[in-house]
Image (spheres, helix red, strand yellow):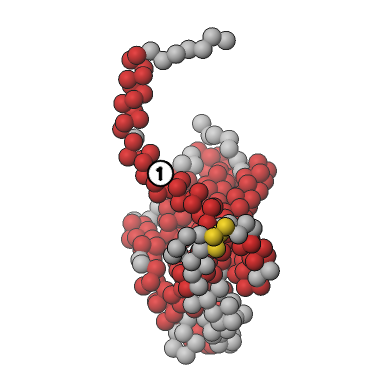
Amino acid sequence: MRRRFLSPLERRKLALGLLFISPWIVGFLAFTLYPILYTLRISFTRYSGFGEPVWIGLANYRALWSDTVFWQSLGNTLYYTALAVPIGIVVALAMAIAMNQPLKEIPFYRAALYLPSVLPLFAVSFIFIALLDPNRGIVNQLMVSLGLPNINWFGDPRYAKLGLVLLAQLGAGNTALVFLAGLKAIPKTLYEAAVLDGAGPLRRFWSVTLPLMTPVILYSLILGLSLGLQVFAQAYIITNGGPANATNFYVFYLYNQAFRYSQMGVASAMAWVLFVITLVLALLIFRTSKRWVNYETVA
């Protein structure tokens, strides 16, 4: 096959296009690609952040393998992600369905449901601490009035991660907006046909809404997986990794290795381990998505 060369006009257009996107190229190379490759190099060294890194091969990875706190932080993170992501998708889908109701006051309800998502995480965290306070919190007082035990959410290792999972649901408004766009894209004729066939609200949800929302659910699942595995700020603000390391999440431990213990090499090795774990889990989800995601378009 004869190779086709660009004409002078096409080469000028290519040069002009590259010139226009050159700021992005420079930013990508300087602030994304270079730090990624730099952390890979540092992960094979002993480096405190000062002086010259000392090459030690796989010693950092072997140290992580025998570090019990590393495995505990990884277990805490997987536990949190396994709960927060599915619950978040269910909450976001329920919020999107509520936002999609044909009510006159729906703009107010949409703003009210979305508002917690735009509040600073620091503010939301302190609000949640007040709500779940074992002595004066509204949630705990309501639980006690219903005969349920008074739980010390952030002081008891058994419930600390559950408390942070509940806190994560206040950010479901962002995902709910994505779900709302997906709901708006479903043709009303499908619901009208289902009604003519005698389908009730629950049947219409299982047979029409849910199958056509699976691509959006897949997107939210991948995004939630990435965010769940990087949970950090909530534990830093509310529990500082406690009690008894119950909320010592992976990125929180990585942060401590880098900026509290000055173990940049270990922290870089942890970052690459997390990257591999995230990549493997995402590929598994994509591979299984062929069985449950509906990509058929509706005319």
Left or right of 125? Residue 108 is left
Please, what is the three-letter code of the amino acid marked with disc 1? Phe
Left or right of 20? Residue 255 is right
Q: Residue at x 66, y 72 (%)?
A: 68
Mark 1 closeness class: few <14, some 14–19, many ≥20 residues within 10 Å: few
Q: Is residue 65 visible?
A: yes
Quadrant for the N terminus, please. top right
Residue 208 in picture, x, y percent from top left: 57, 45
Residue 23 in picture, x, y percent from top left: 32, 40
Report the front residue among 75 and 128.
Answer: 75
Residue 82: image quadrant is: bottom right
Q: Residue at x 50, y 87 (%)?
A: 134
Residue 16: image quadrant is: top left
Q: Residue at x 58, y 37 (%)?
A: 295
Report the front residue among 25 and 135.
Answer: 25
Left or right of 26? Residue 91 is right
Disc 1: which residue: 28
Q: Residue at x 42, y 56 (%)?
A: 174
* Residue 246, above or below 51: below
Residue 227 in picture, x, y percent from top left: 51, 58
Report the front residue among 108 and 244.
Answer: 244
Point out the residue furthest to the bottom here: 135
Q: Is residue 97 visible?
A: no
Point out the residue furthest to the top here: 2
Residue 299 in picture, x, y percent from top left: 51, 31
